[in-house]
Amino acid sequence: MFDFPEFIRFPVRGYIDAGMKWLLKHCSVFFDALGWLILHVMNFFTFIFTSIPWFVLIIVIFLLGWKLMKSLKTAFMMSLMLFIIGGFGYWELAMQTLGLVSASVMFSLLIGIPTGVAMAQSDRSQMILKPILDGMQTMPSFVYLIPALMFFGLGKVPSVIATIIYAVPPVIRLTNVGIRTVDKEAVEAAKAFGAKKSEILWDVQLPLAKPSIMVGINQTTMMALAMVVIGSMIGAKGLGMEVLMSISRIDVGRGFEAGISIVFLAIIIDRITHTISQNKK
C-alpha cells in the first residue's frame, strides 16, 4: 500500500538515450563545427588576457574602478585583489579562467538577448520559454555536463557549453522583463509618429530596457564564474582545476587560495558590470 506500483513506469530515459544516439550519428559534423568555433573563440580571449602584462592589467582595473565608481578606495581595493591573486601564484590560471568566462558570456549574450527580445514580442513565446528557463535554472548544474561530454568529449569546449546553458537564463529573463516594462506611452508615441515595429524595438524599447539588460549581463557573468569549478571536472583548466585538485588531495591551504582568488575575480567583475548598469539608468 505504501509502495508505488511497479507496473506504473515512464521510461523517459530510453527515449532520451535514443535521441542522443541519433544526434551523435546524424549531427556529428554540426557538433564538430560548433566545437571548433567555441574552442577558437575561447583561445582568442585567453590569448588576450595572457598577453597583457600583469602590471598593465592591474593599472587598467584601478583606472576603470576609479572612473566608474568615482572612488579611489574601491579602485585601490580592486587592483589589490588582482595583485593578491598574482601573489598566490595563480595569475596565469586566473587569466585562463577569465578567458573561459568571457567566451561563455559572449555566447550567452549572443543567444540570450535575441531570445529575450523574441520572448518579449510574443506571449506564446513567453509561455513556451518560461518553463524551459525554470528547468535550466533549477536543474543541478552537474547534469549539463553529461550531454556536453557526449557531444564534445573532455576538455574546454564541453565546459563552455555547460556554462552557457547554466548562465544564459538571467539575460533572457531580464531582457524580456526590460522590454515588457517599457513605458507604453513611449511606444504609443512612436507608433503615432509612424515608426515601424523594428524602429520601435531599436529606437525606443531596447534603449529604455538597457538598465534591465545590463543587470541581466551582470547576473549571467556571475553565474558563468560560478561554473568554473564544475567545468574543471571535465577538463577545463584555470582556478577551478586548482580547487578540484585541492579537494582530491585534502589540501585546505591550496583550496583556500584558489577559492578566494575566484571570489576576488567575482567581486571585481560584479562591481564593474553593476556600476555600468547603474550608470545606464
Image (tube, helix red, strand yellow):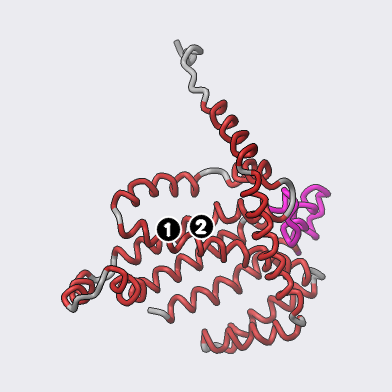
For marks 2 and 1, the one nearer the N-term is 1
**Residue lying farthest to the left in this orientation:** 192
Q: Nearer the viewer, residue 79 or 64?
A: 64
The reply to whether discs 2 and 1 touch (Cβ–Cβ < 8 Å) is yes
Quadrant location, the N terminus: top left
| Secondary structure that dominates the magenta span | helix
Question: Residue 245: where, in percent of width, then height?
Answer: 80, 52
In the rendered structure, find residue 115 and report the number of the disc placed on it.
1
Residue 140 rendering spot, x and y as whole percentages: 56, 43
In the image, the segment drawn in magenta is 229-257
Task: Identify the secondary structure beneath mark 2.
Answer: helix
Instruction: Out of 151 and 3, give the one closest to the viewer.
Output: 151
- Residue linked to disc 2: 168
The quadrant in which residue 52 appears is bottom right
Kindly state the secondary structure of the residue where label 1 is placed.
helix
Q: Amino acid at mark 1?
A: Thr
In the rendered image, residue 70 lying in the magenta stretch gets the answer no
x and y percent of residue 117 in the render?
Answer: 37, 62
Q: Position of residue 42 (x, y in %)?
A: 68, 64
Mark 2 belongs to which amino acid? Answer: Val
Residue 82 lies, with reference to residue 262, above or below; the image says below
Q: Residues within 10 Å of mark 2 (few under 14, many from 20)?
A: many
Per the model, the C-alpha gap separating discs 2 and 1 is 10 Å
Q: Is residue 251 magenta?
A: yes
Q: Residue at x 54, y 28 (%)?
A: 15
Q: Quadrant of residue 114?
A: bottom left
